[in-house]
Each structure stands twice: as structure tokens, then as C-alpha cells.
Image (cartoon, helix red, strand yellow):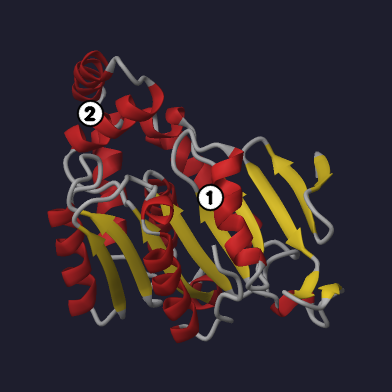
Amino acid sequence: MLDRTPLSRCVTAHRLSKNVTFYINESGSPVSGCQTPASEEKKPLLLMLPWLGSRPQAISKYCDIYFRTGFDVLVVESEVQEFLWPRWGLDRGKKLLELLQSERFVSRPLLVHAFSIGGYTFAQLLVHISQDMQKYQTLTQRIKGQVYDSLVVGSLETMTIGLSKTVFPGWEMLVKQTSLLYFRIFKHQTVDYFKTGIDAFWSSPITAPALFFFCENDAISEARVTEELIGYWRKRGIDVTAKKWEDSIHAGHLKKHPQEYLSSLNTFLHSVHIAPLKAKM
């Protein structure tokens, strides 16, 4: 535990590592004030995987939603190098799995909420889980629901566009061309790993109900491919709910369509038997 920062009267942030922060929500309910839960080990935990380059103020808006619902939140931020050199992403994925199976979290029911390239980060976990289903069986059973907001899906070109827009705005074309050249040169160290991660995601060992948020005008998240993924998961027997807009913002649907976003999320949480939202944005 490297840092311990109070966020509010009832939420405390614990910096577990450079890109991992654990937010402890000490409120018993939205109206009862701070209290210690009777059984911490059964308290729901949200694994939040934000978009690349997300700002704390933006992340906090989503954290607040789950705090008011009674969750603790574990935020795991992605880094560019994990995308450029996937082996590092796999290594971090394994460490995250170890953390989720540590004494602090091993009995917690889990909900996953991944934004944009955060879905790629989660795919790295799925690669490890797929390779040793018996080892991670208990963990997969603890995941009660999964939410994907603006999932980066589509071609390698689509992913490089997302990278350039996020990290190097104004230099999109140059970064795109350079990235594609880089991926061709280091195909075995990059593209082959991407394919493994994509395959693990499509054939995900996590069969908990899923909610997808996406839109038609997103250049980074191809709506057609998202719909194909949703259809494929439904054929596998996974209960999938989808909320699509014709016009919205990549990883900004809550800002653009707050009532519809919260309503969909509220209904989903209720369907997976996790307390519905108490707050209105």
C-alpha cells in the first residue's frame, strides 16, 4: 500500500501500485452514513478498466455511481506500452489475476466495467484464464456481470487510429502509418499476440451476463463488429444486453446520454442481482 488518500467522508483511496488504485467505500448505504459492512468478504467489488489517457475527474464520475450502489472499486489503468508490446500486457494481466485471488479480494463477488482499450486489458486476463480453466474456475464464477463501454473492436488499423487520437492528437495520420509499419516489422511480437487476445475475448470463459454500450459514429469502436460479437455471444448462451446510439461520443456515452446510460446500467445491475443504483446524475 503506497498511498492512502481520503476522497470523501466515506471513501478512501489506496494506491496499490503505479496504475492500480483500490477505493474503499465505507458507507453502509446511500443514506445511513459511514459504517463498517457486516461482512467485507461478501461486499461487491467493481473492477474498472478505464480508457487510455482517462483523467481522474472523468473516472470519478463512474466510481461515484458504484459507490452509491455499495461497491468498492478497483481501478486498473492501461498504458501505451502494454499495447505496443503485448507481452508486457500479458505479464500485467497475470499480476492482476494474482491480486484478484489474494486474501483481500478472493471472496468478493465481481463486476467488470471496461472502457475502450480497457477491454483489451481484460482480454489479457482472459488469455491466462483460458490456458488454465481449473486454476481460475473460482474466479470466473465470482464474476456476476460484465459491462463494456465503447469496446475497441475491429481491424488493427482501427486500434491504431484509437491509439493516435488518444495519445497523439493532431498527429493521427503520422502515428497511424508509423504504428502499422511497426506492427508489420514486429508481427510475431505484436499482431500474433493481438490475435490470441481477440480469440480469447470472442470465446471468453466468462459467461456472466454482459451489457454493451456503443454507437454508430465511433471510428475507434466499429458498431458492425460489436454487433457481430454480441450475436456470437448470444449464440453461445450468454445473456447480452446492448444499448446503441446513432450519435454519441467514444467512452463518453454517460456525458452525452446520462439518463439512458444510467437507466440501462441500473436495469442490468438489478438483473444480475447486484443492488440497483440509488443516485441520479
Which element carries disc 2, helix, strand or loop?
helix
In the image: residue 193, left or right of residue 70: left
Q: Residue 242 falls in which quadrant of the image?
A: bottom left
Whole-percent x and y of residue 149? 37, 56
Q: Amino acid at mark 1?
A: Lys
In the image: residue 197, left or right of residue 216: right
Q: Residue 31 falls in which quadrant of the image?
A: bottom right
Which element carries disc 1, helix, strand or loop?
helix
Numbered label attached to residue 274:
none
In the image: residue 249, left or right of residue 215: right
Q: Is residue 41 above or below residue 177?
A: below
**Residue found 66% across the figure and 69% down from its top:** 68
Circles 2 and 1, Cβ within 8 Å, touching? The answer is no
Q: Nearer the viewer, residue 120 or 101?
A: 120
Judging by the rendered image, the residue that carries numbered circle 2 is 187
- The extreme right residue here reads 35
Quadrant (top left/top right/bottom left/bottom right) for the N terminus: top right
**Residue 97 visible, this angle:** no
Quadrant (top left/top right/bottom left/bottom right) for the C terminus: bottom right
Q: Badge 2, how many Cα within 10 Å: few under 14, some, many 20+?
A: some
**Residue found 38% across the figure and 34% down from its top:** 83
**Residue found 23% across the figure and 13% down from its top:** 174
**Residue 116 visible, this angle:** yes
Q: Is residue 25 above or below residue 251?
A: below
Give the Cα separation between the discs numbered 2 and 1. Answer: 22 Å
Q: Badge 1, how many Cα within 10 Å: few under 14, some, many 20+?
A: some
Whole-percent x and y of residue 73? 64, 59
Q: Amino acid at mark 2?
A: Lys
Whole-percent x and y of residue 172? 26, 20
Whole-percent x and y of residue 154? 18, 46
Judging by the rendered image, the residue that carries numbered circle 1 is 94
